[in-house]
Image: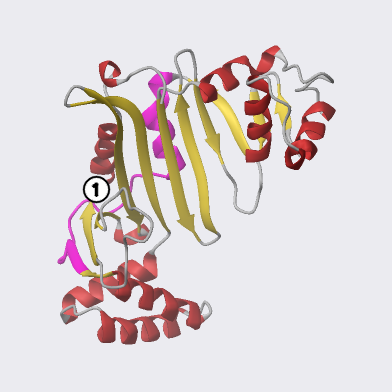
Amino acid sequence: MPSYDSSRARFRLADRHIAVFAHLLDGETPPEELWEGVVELQRIGLVGEEGELVPLLRDLLGTLAAPLLLLQVEVTGEHGPVNHGVVVGRDAVISHDGWPGEEESEYVPIEPSSLVWELARKVNLHRGEPTQPPAHPRIETTMGALDAAFVALGEAAGDEAVARELTRKALVETSGLEPAALDQFLELVIALNATWRITAAWDGEHEGERSAMIRALAAWDCGPSGYWIREQPEEPILPGQVTPESPLVVAWTTPGDVWERITDLLPDTEDLIDGV
């Protein structure tokens, strides 16, 4: 069920509610499959009986309708993937956060100056992780080895000793890593809190022509084993591009370096063309 907090101009909305707004903004009657969403929005007073939208929605819908910059954040942890993001418009910046198992996301305006902080918050970037590189700061194997390790972890059903035994066996059979590097990779998989990726997209200019511009960053949060940038498969990944034989390369880094990499995803103001 959608809801809103007028004191902070924040909203809890599902994708179907956003779709309803899109039709109403275009002067269209939402299709039958969205009618439940229309009724829900009318019930809480965001949509009138004739499809009129309340003024409180102005910044949110204006930004979503004409974004200058889209930032998508996908975080995969114990409960599966959760999607977050930030939409930068001409007059407002809107952040949205998902929640595991919930249909709605929370949409809230933020200050443009806090954009990098907001992205860092969404991926739970934190200090206190190792600042000295491990003995093997770069691991090169295959996606098939990672898949085999995840299957082994699932079979362990939460028993850490069994998890280590089964995962080690799987990696010996699939990874092609020397023993010391295999031990390092095993620790990463066991310690993995979450994987995440941030994708920035905007309309820019390439070789004198208007073009969609994309930058992306993918990382592993391995808790006591620190942060590891996934260099391969390289983002952005197209559907069907990754196979079990695809190279997997992860490289250790510091939280400070992750912060800089997030900052580097953002285009300069002069690189943006109105509308994405």
The residue depicted at 55 percent of the width and 39 percent of the height is 97
Horizontal relation, residue 193 to residue 234: left or right: right
Where the C terminus falls, by quadrant? top left
Query: Which residue is found at the position 32% from the left and 68% from the top?
Result: 243
- As shown in the figure, which amino acid type bears the numbered disc 1? Thr
The part of the chain drawn in magenta is: 112-140
Residue 108 visible: yes
Examine the image and state in which quarter residue 214 appears.
Answer: top left
Residue drawn at the location 77% of the way across and 20% of the way down: 51
User: In this rendering, would 80 be left or right of 206?
Assistant: right
Q: Residue at x 26, y 72 (%)?
A: 245
Q: Is residue 69 above or below residue 101?
A: above
Q: Is residue 8 visible?
A: no
Q: Residue 239: x percent and y percent?
A: 38, 56
Magenta span has 125? yes
Q: Is residue 121 magenta?
A: yes
Q: The N terminus lies in which quarter of the figure?
A: top right
User: Is 133 placed left or right of 173 in the picture?
Assistant: left
Between 80 and 27, the residue placed more toward the observer is 27
Residue pointed to by mark 1: 254
- Residue 209 at x, y = what percent? 23, 24
Identify whether 71 is placed above or below 153. above
